[in-house]
Amino acid sequence: MSRVIEVPDVLDHKGFEVLIRALNEVTQEGAARVLFNAKHVRWTSPYGLIGLLAAGRVARERTGFAPSIEAPDNREVRGYWERMDFWHVAPEVYDLEPVPARAHGSSDALLEITPIRSHHDVHAVVERVRERASTILLNKLHYARPSVIQFSVLLSEVCQNIIEHAEADGWVCAQTYNYRERLGRDVVQLAVMDVGIGFEGSLSAEHSRRHGERWSAGMALERALLHGESRHRDPGRGQGLQAIRRQVDRWHGELGIRSGDAMIASPTQEWGDLAHMQTGLEKFPGAQILVVMPAHVENE
Amino acid sequence: METEGSSSPLPDIAVASLYQRNLVTRHTGRAVRLSIEGLVSELGATSLTVLDFGDVAVIDFSCADEVVAKLVLRAVDDVSAESQHFFVFRGVAQHHLDPMDSALRRRGLAAAAEGPEGEPFLIGDVEPVASRLWLAVCEAGHACLDDLAPVLGMEPGDCGRLLDRMCARRLLRRDGQAYHSLFYTFAEAERAGNGHGTAGPDAPDGAPPSERE
């Protein structure tokens, strides 16, 4: 019999924390099949959706069995998952029959869930997203024309974070929605996740000795995001995340990176709900990146 | 005070088209750089290679580091008396600037660039006074210290040190007492028949055919 993980009804970055707490509890009990029950999910963000893939992958690694998943009852949520190609990608993680991919461009998604395994995937993502980014960033978010290329650069750098540092595969997706409650504006949310070695693991060999016992996931995130440090001594490395941070700041958006048991956010905004630094979170492998870009308003 | 400058032969020149619409990922950048380095190795001991960014829609920070910063770094690090390699980045538009400039600055480097309309400018780590001096040389094509120092209101000693420093950074080329802009050098070399035609690095490993022109 499977052990059941109840997927939170609101599956965003906060719901993801609830999900992985449940995952850690269930998988502590040893090898057994796991069922992710998503029947009651009534809202999902891009971060939450690929978070479900990441959690499923970890469940699979810990138990040795591909987990099962119950689809949401809510028709809108089911439609959203389909439009984001969740069921096409999910069989790599979950015990599901393969489903063909939708024709790209046939949905309103900025970027459907796309696995990132090599630099080829990054090229494909940058190429694929250009036209839709142009429509969404210019018409919906009212950004200036250069933002289309700046978004491609940002996308490329966040995806490369997986290839260069995770030592594992990952996923990326992006979607526009109206952030009614807190902002009352459209936003683009971009999410990138892997379940690899994480920032602490990536930077450890080069930096942990210098910081001794203070070395932690939080410190690794701080060194990488705020100080541009990487696992390499080469001064040309480590600029990607800093560039992402600068760009998100120019758009008055938010950038959050979770790794291990910590999450750092910079920049943060008054309308957002990311804290500058959270530590002592539930441990989870890899890195989970969240970018929120709000629609531009005059006088901002 | 003027310093004795050695005569430097006109360089072999080449124009490299990048054949990539999206210069993204470190992997792609490495492959492009290796192709360009292969191209440069086939030129003479003194060379000037123009990299044409006219068809490049996107360049990211990682790729800019691999292609732009590392090519310049190796040219500057090569201090042998026998060889001098110069690079000019042509067709550099506003959307290329941030990644290229940032990659160069992180390594304390600078590079000569030309905008889409042919306007010369420096990118990377350059003091404003050096930039003004460089533009004055570009405007003149070639000039001596005695001509440049008064125009910019500089002490000749300071001006000479700055010019020599820019030669060491491969932003100018010195020939005897004269400092030559790289654009003037290119035109001169072309007139002298030192051109090796238009060349392009091979498409990097794995680049989809659609990315090739």
Image (cartoon, coloured by chain):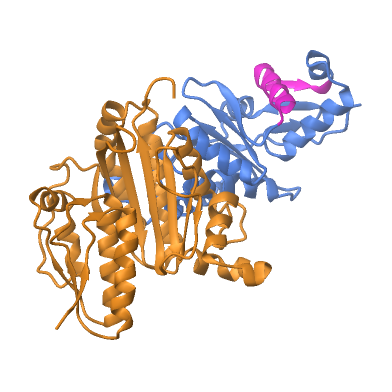
| Residue B35 image position (x, y, % from top left) | 47, 51
| Residue A111 image position (x, y, % from top left) | 25, 46
Q: Residue furthest top?
A: B151
Residue drawn at (88%, 22%), measured in percent from left and top? B155
- How many tags in the picture? 0
Viewer-proximal residue among A249 and A247? A249
Residue A14 visible: yes
User: Which quadrant, please, contains the C terminus of chain B?
Assistant: top left
Q: Is residue B130 magenta?
A: yes
Viewer-proximal residue among A38 and B53? A38
Which is the main secondary structure of the residues drawn in magenta?
helix
Viewer-proximal residue among A222 and A278? A278
Q: Residue furthest front?
A: A181
Q: Name the side, left or right, on which A291 lies relative to B14.
A: left
Q: Name the side, left or right, on which B139 lies relative to B90.
A: right
Residue drawn at (83%, 28%), measured in percent from left and top? B160
| Chain coloured blue in the rendered structure | B
Q: Quadrant of residue A142?
A: top left
Residue B57 visible: no
Q: Name the side, left or right, on which A251 lies relative to A65.
A: right
Instruction: In the rendered view, tell whether residue B180 sits above or below residue A130.
Output: above
The magenta stretch is: B127-145
- Chain A: drawing colour: orange
User: Which quadrant, please, contains the N terminus of chain B?
Assistant: top right
Q: Quadrant of residue A132?
A: top left
| Residue A267 image position (x, y, % from top left) | 49, 42
Instruction: In the rendered view, tell whether residue A182 sits above or below residue A241.
Output: above
Q: Name the side, left or right, on which B134 lies relative to A109.
A: right
Q: Is residue A159 magenta?
A: no
Instruction: In the rendered view, tell whether residue A28 sits above or below residue A132.
Output: below
Residue drawn at (58%, 23%), measured in percent from left and top? B120
